[in-house]
Amino acid sequence: MTTDPTDPDRAPDPERPDHPVPDVTPAEPNSPTVPDVPPGPDIPDVTPADPEPEVEPSPSVPDVTPAEGVVRAPSIEEVTGYTEGGVPTFDAVRDKIEKRLGTAMGAEELARETEPARTLEEEFEDRKKAAADKLAEIRRSMTS
């Protein structure tokens, strides 16, 4: 057997081809070409971020430590606030009540700051003072 690469009877060696094999399949004659993309900027090495601190689980989440590398999907109750039977959970009801209370308190606080509300409050204070004065007058008249 000869080792001359120009010998026509030589068996091809798959490990060392005569011509370099292209990395991609050549395009069809009518296929669009992709323009060359210039190389991007060099990105410096970044030190890894510190892991986030452990967070205390909320009371609605059962205290179960999953196996390492296993991620636990939230239950339907945690996502929707309702059981599979359609009953609201205590946490969902509490959250809804707290939200409504906060909204009502905020609306009341904003309403007090308007001009008509201040005028009404001043009128109420004037009436309250007039009532206290009248009560004091009645008490004085009864003792004399």
Image: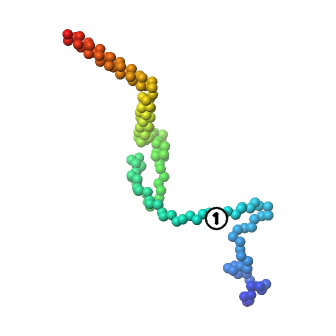
Q: Quadrant of the N terminus?
A: bottom right
User: Considering only vertical position in the picture, is 59 above or below 7?
Assistant: above
- The x, y position of residue 47, in whole percent, is 48, 64
Q: Quadrant of the C terminus?
A: top left
**Mark 1 surroundings: few (<14), some (14-19) or many (≥20) residues within 10 A:** few
The residue under the point 64% across, 64% down is 39
Residue holding disc 1: 39
- The x, y position of residue 124, in whole percent, is 37, 21
- 11 and 85: which one is in front? 11
- 22 and 135: which one is in front? 135
Q: Look at the numbered disc 1 and give the secondary structure of its residue.
A: loop
- 113 and 26: which one is in front? 113
- The x, y position of residue 46, in whole percent, is 51, 63
User: Considering only vertical position in the picture, is 74 above or below 46?
Assistant: above
Residue 114 found in image quarter: top left
Q: Is residue 101 visible?
A: yes
- The x, y position of residue 33, in whole percent, is 74, 61
Count of labels in the image: 1
Q: Say what amino acid the circle numbered 1 marks.
A: Pro
User: Considering only vertical position in the picture, is 86 above or below 41?
Assistant: above
